[in-house]
Amino acid sequence: MAKPYRAGWGVRASNAWMRTVIRAGLPMWTFHVLTVRGRRTRRAIQTPLAVFEQDGRRYLVASYGTVNWVRNLRAAQGKATLRQGRHLETVTAVELPTDQAAQVFRASLLSGPPHVPKPIVALYRRFFVLPYLDVNMDSSPQQFLENARTHPVFEIVPT
């Protein structure tokens, strides 16, 4: 059974640091700042996320399950912006059906974020991702399909 995800003080501090670095334009591989309207406050909520690329398409993968950025993105009907340095892109994030999401989810877990050194991916995956999943590197496609129901994947479509 996977642990429930809770964003503690360390995660909040890390996210604040990542937002600052990404907005400043310092290279952080394929990490972007996702900005979406809060479902309750209607204020802009900024979350640093890795953008996964597969077959020429880009995806946001909810490795920690249905967390706040996922709920906010659903409430905003996928309307959001992605920022990396000075580059600001208005996008629509389209939630994938479970069978397609499972394939992207599996590929993103196996490869990690693009261009991130493999040792960093391996450590991050081992200590910060796998404890929150009911799958591991050797899980079957069927197990990923079952997990994709609680770990949504969004395809990024430029608008």
Image (spheres, grey):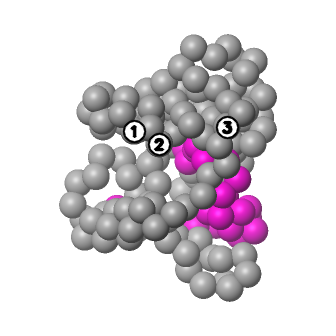
Q: Secondary structure at mark 3?
A: loop
Q: Nearer the viewer, residue 127 or 64?
A: 127
Tag 1 residue: 124
Residue at point 73%, 21% (across, down)? 143
Q: Amino acid at mark 3?
A: Ala
Q: Nearer the viewer, residue 35 or 93?
A: 35
- Which span is picked out in magenta? 59-84
Whether residue 23 is situated above or below residue 98 in the rendered picture? below
Tag 3 residue: 2
CB under 8 Å between callouts 3 and 2?
Answer: no
CB under 8 Å between callouts 1 and 3?
Answer: no
Q: Secondary structure at mark 1?
A: helix
Tell me the crowding category of disc 3: few under 14, some 14 to 19, or many 20 or more residues within 10 angstroms, Cα based.
Answer: few
Q: Amino acid at mark 2?
A: Phe
Which is more N-terminal, label 3 or label 1? 3
Front position among marks 1 and 3:
3
Whether residue 45 is situated above or below residue 5 in the rendered picture? below
Tag 2 residue: 128
Q: CA distance from mark 2 to mark 1?
A: 5 Å
Q: Amino acid at mark 1?
A: Tyr
Q: Secondary structure at mark 2?
A: helix
Q: CA distance from mark 1 to mark 3?
A: 16 Å
Residue at point 28%, 29% (across, down)? 119
